[in-house]
Amino acid sequence: MVTPLLTTTLDATRSAVAAARARGQRVGFVPTMGALHAGHLSLIRRARAECGFVVVSIFVNPTQFGPHEDLARYPRPFEKDLAACTAEAVDLIFNPTAEVVYPPFFKTFVEVTGLQNVLCGATRPGHFRGVATVVLKLFNIVQPDVAYFGQKDAQQARILIQMVRDLHLSVEMVLCPIVREADGLALSSRNVYLSTEQRQQAPVLFQCLRMIQERIAAGDRLTEPLVQLARARIWETPGARLDYAAIVDFERLEPIDVLSGKVLIALAVFFGATRLIDNILVDVSPA
Ligand code: AMP
């Protein structure tokens, strides 16, 4: 196995990618914050299958964390991540410092208005501004042909697709399915924060989503009773505190009364200080 090339600067990253492109290779990019798990690896494998040159960025982006969030304690198991990238035959890991990405006197941010302040954005002000800004920066540094994102962060993916469209970026965006534990819990780098009891209760998010999905399959089309089902289920779960349960149109991320078209069913639930998210996307035909 060949260890991936490791870069920390813009110049080194750009010249490695330029060399790949000069060889005629399609450049695939998977942005991550590290602490890689099977969810990340599914994106990397898809990139590996579709591209000649695979770039993974590992960067815990400070601008997407709120002042009371977990920036300082976010897991950073770099050696383990390096081994995982080596095993997946990644070509290049871009692992910059915060000073490289945000040099002194940095002044420019990207805002995807309308989509950034709802759902997770309502609880995490400024989060998606930080995400859009860093992803645009990473796109400008890596200049990929195609970038891979997980449906796990559905609002993030929707916002980034909008950014690419609105700013005329020539990156193809690929959305990959959510990878889950056997009991349904969506894999997340934050699952390590859960206590044994919290971990036992955590699959309740997916259980709520499945419950709603079954009701839709049975013909339910009104959203409010379905949202109430999820609220009640979280309410009765020990240690769980609902942040939001929402059923929205996936294009606009706006609540809808009656289900139709491409619909996002999304949940955010606190277990102590740990906030878990999960969702399903459903294409709803008229009942
Ligand atoms: P993060 O390191 O949390 O910024 O995530 C990097 C990428 O991995 C994002 O596009 C996430 O949506 C994706 N991702 C995280 N968890 C999962 C999962 N369980 N299944 C699929 N993709 C995921």
Image (spheres, rainbow, N blue to C red):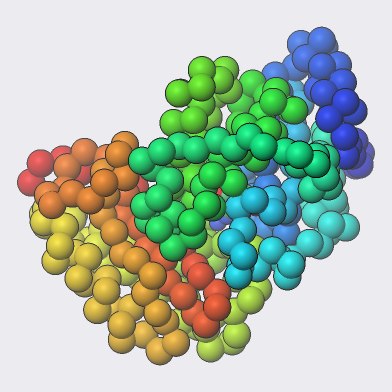
Residue 131 at x, y percent in the picture: 58, 45
Does any portion of residue 152 appear in the rendered image?
no
Q: Which residue, as the protein is rendered here, is positioned at the far front? A: 105
The relative height of residue 63 versus residue 89 in the rendered view (above or below) is below
Q: Identify which residue, 89 or 151, lies in the foreground.
A: 151
Picture quadrant of residue 23: top right
Picture quadrant of residue 205: bottom left
Q: Identify which residue, 99 or 157, lies in the foreground.
A: 99
Q: Identify which residue, 280 or 267, lies in the foreground.
A: 267
Residue 208 at x, y percent in the picture: 32, 69
Residue at 84% of width from left, 57% of height from top? Answer: 78
Residue at 80% of width from left, 39% of height from top? Answer: 103
Residue 222 left/right relative to 119: left
Q: Identify which residue, 132 or 236, lies in the foreground.
A: 132
Residue 211 left/right relative to 13: left
Residue 60 at x, y percent in the picture: 72, 53
Residue at 76% of width from left, 39% of height from top? Answer: 105
Image quarter of the N terminus: top right
Residue 150 left/right relative to 244: right
